[in-house]
Image (spheres, grey):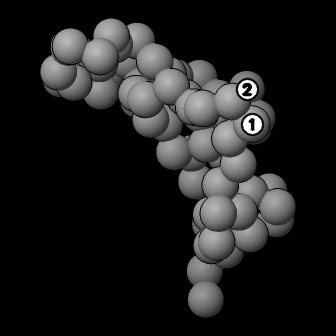
Amino acid sequence: MLKGKFILITPEKFPDRYKPTGHNFQLCEQGRLLIISYPSLDSTTLLSRKHCIDMNHLAERIVMMTQ
């Protein structure tokens, strides 16, 4: 099994005291998964290509900082 590291960026705001469950929790605990809330949208705006590109750029910056 491969032991890759992942960054999951979601446009939804996390609820108070959010913690991942199940497999995602195990991956976070192992330091293999980072989950980030990037709530750049309000509840009436649809996710656009620009929002996705912004989230990808955020992931790229995180990777560059950790190398």
Closer to the N terminus: mark 1 or mark 2? Answer: 1
User: Is 40 on the left or on the right of 31, as rendered?
Assistant: left
Res. 21 image quadrant:
bottom right
Height in image: 30 above or below 38?
A: below
Going 59% across and 23% down the picture, which residue do you hit? 61
Going 61% across and 89% down the picture, which residue do you hit? 1
The percent position of residue 26, horizontal first and vertical second, equals 74, 69
Res. 17 image quadrant:
top right
**Residue 41 visible within the image:** yes
Height in image: 64 above or below 51?
A: below
Residue on which disc 2 sits: 65
The percent position of residue 11, horizontal first and vertical second, equals 40, 27
Kindly give the residue lying farthest to the front in the view shown: 16
Residue on which disc 1 sits: 17
Mark sitting on residue 44: none
Badge 1, how many Cα within 10 Å: few under 14, some, many 20+?
few
